[in-house]
Structure formats: structure tokens, C-alpha cells
Amino acid sequence: LCAFVAPAEAQTYPTRSITMIVPFAAGGPTDVISRIVTAHMAQTLGQSIIIENVVGAGGTTATTRAARAANDGYTLITGHMGTHAASVPLYPKLAYHPEKDFEPIALLAGTPILILARKDFPPKDLKEFVTYVKANVEKVNAAHAGVGSVSHVSCELLHSILGIKPVGVPFNGTGPAMNALVAGQVDYMCDQIVNAVPQINAGTIKAYAIATPERNPSLPNVPTTAEAGLPAFQAQAWNAIFAPKGTSPAIIASLNAAAIKALDDETVKKRLLELGSVIPGAKDRTPEALATLVKNEIAKWTPVLKPAT
Ligand code: MLT
């Protein structure tokens, strides 16, 4: 019986709208990337994809919910380097495991990390920033999107390199954290480029450096951390779609194909590139490649973050 049911299901999927859980507030990098890509995927799939922002605990509240959702292809999640890697060492009682409880669907974007500050933060460049935060560690604060979020773990890495432990100010996403940075309510942040480009171009915040080996074409005037004197700080995040474990291979294949089609669409590509994202190449677009990325990222972040817990 199953042999006949599965193909029929695959041919008809999806027959109703799909929910895409975004584990952070609207307006942040995960939300923006999800909306750009899923708008195109919805056209391919012939059904709407409804974004549901579910916030809390550095994205792990939403990811727990996604892990427990029905594995029928109608509830998906846009996870990232935090929810599907860094959360493992940071949350000893994590209610899901990124590898055991999810089916990888498709990597959507790589997102370089930048060191950003409020416009009137005194340091002029990265060298001054390093001296300043070390000298004023009791006074300065770093905004982030909750323990285990990309912004949190990226600045944890920066702080471990600098040998400091400043106060962190958690938000439900770096969308609201960015609003606080623009308003001058927090001092600095390590955030994904997607959130930073519009604000840097509008002159509402400062960017000290991008933590990748090369400058980003969307921000040609922002130096790399190596150029600015801190080569040890290298950080790039990623965003990807996952489904609950046990989702059928046919549904996974259909979602993966729709995601790839979106990444190849000229309008989608242009928008992602304008925001500084790195669009995955052919070999990085398969569910298997995403499974390998998750495995490698858990292995990479575990020794870095475990001592901090
Ligand atoms: C993060 O820091 O993990 C993200 O920037 C959260 C978000 O998308 O708002």
C-alpha cells in the first residue's frame, strides 16, 4: 500500500499553505533571507508560504517547536549557524538535536559577520575599538539576539580573542537589536551583513570591519579584520531550511528544487547580493551538503563555546 501512497502524495504536495518558522523577530537577517527566498519558492510550489516569527532563547524555542511539528512538509524552519550548531554546546538541555531531529533541505545564504557600533561610539577604527573596549570593559555593552544566536556567539568569539567579558544585552533578534544600536541605546554588535548593509549605507551606524578574508562587494569601503589589525577574528554565518525528521524524501526533493530555483532567479540573486550574502554554489545546494555543514559546524563551535558554559 505504502508503495502506492508515497508517489501520489509527492505529486500533489503541497495542497495547502506552508508555514515557515523564523526563530527571530521580523526585520532581522533570518527573517529577511527567509522572506526573499520563500516568496519565490511559493510561486514554484503553487502555494503560499506563511512566515511565522517565533522568538525566544536565542532561536531555540522556535527550533524546538519545529522539531516537534508534524513531518508532513507543511511546517518548516529557517535555521542558522546558531540554532543548528552553536546551540548544541551552549544549551546542555536542548530539547532537539540539529542532526537527529531535522531533515536538511537547502542552504540559502552565507552571511559574513561585521563588528558594528552606534554612530557616536568613540573609537574611530578597529584598533581604537580594541583598546577602548579593553579599557572600558565595565562600561560597554554588546547587543545580541539571545544566547546561542549568531550575534551572541560571534561576539563571544571576538571577546575570547580580546580576553574580555563585557555585558551582553539580549533582544529577540538582531532586527530589534539593530534598532537599539541606531537609537544609540547599546554600544556595539557582531551581526550578519544582511542586517548591516542598509544601515551602514544610510550612515546610521559604524562598521569597523568584516570578519572574512576578503572585503564584501556590497560594502567595498569596510576593511577586513585582517586589514584592520585583528586577523584572528574570522566569522561567517549561514541560513538554511530544515524540516522535521521523517519528512518524506519526495517532499524534501520538491522543497530543495524550489529553493534552488529561487537562488537562481535573477531578482532573488540581486537582492541577496545587494545585502552582502554569499549565494551557495552548486555543490553546496544539496540536502547532503547541508547535513555535512551542520555536522562540521557543531564540531567547530563545540570546543569554542563549551568552556563558556
Ligand atoms: C542572530 O543573531 O542569530 C540573528 O541575527 C538573529 C536574527 O535573525 O534576528
Image (cartoon, rainbow, N blue to C red):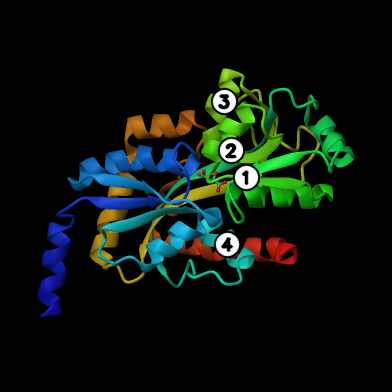
Q: Examine the image and state in which quarter residue 254 appears.
A: bottom left
Kindly report the distance in space between the C-alpha atoms of the residues bearing marks 3 and 2. 12 Å
Nearest the eye: 30 or 231? 30
Query: Which is more N-terminal, label 2 or label 1?
Result: 1
Could you say whether the residue bearing mark 2 is in a helix, strand or loop? helix
- Towards the viewer: 262 or 158: 158
Q: Amino acid at mark 2?
A: Ala
Q: Which residue is mark 2?
A: 177
The answer to whether mark 1 and mark 2 are in CB contact below 8 A is: yes
Please report contact status of discs 4 and 3: CB closer than 8 Å, yes or no. Answer: no
User: Residue at the spot x=52%, y=35% of the render?
Assistant: 194
Q: Is residue 38 visible?
A: yes
Q: Which residue is mark 4?
A: 87
**Residue 301 against residue 202 in the figure, above or below:** below
Q: Residue furthest top?
A: 202
Q: Is mark 1 within 8 Å of ligand 1?
A: yes
Instruction: Name the residue tied to disc 1.
Output: 144
For residue 71, which quarter of the picture?
bottom left
Residue 45 relative to residue 124: left or right: left
Give residue 199's mark: 3
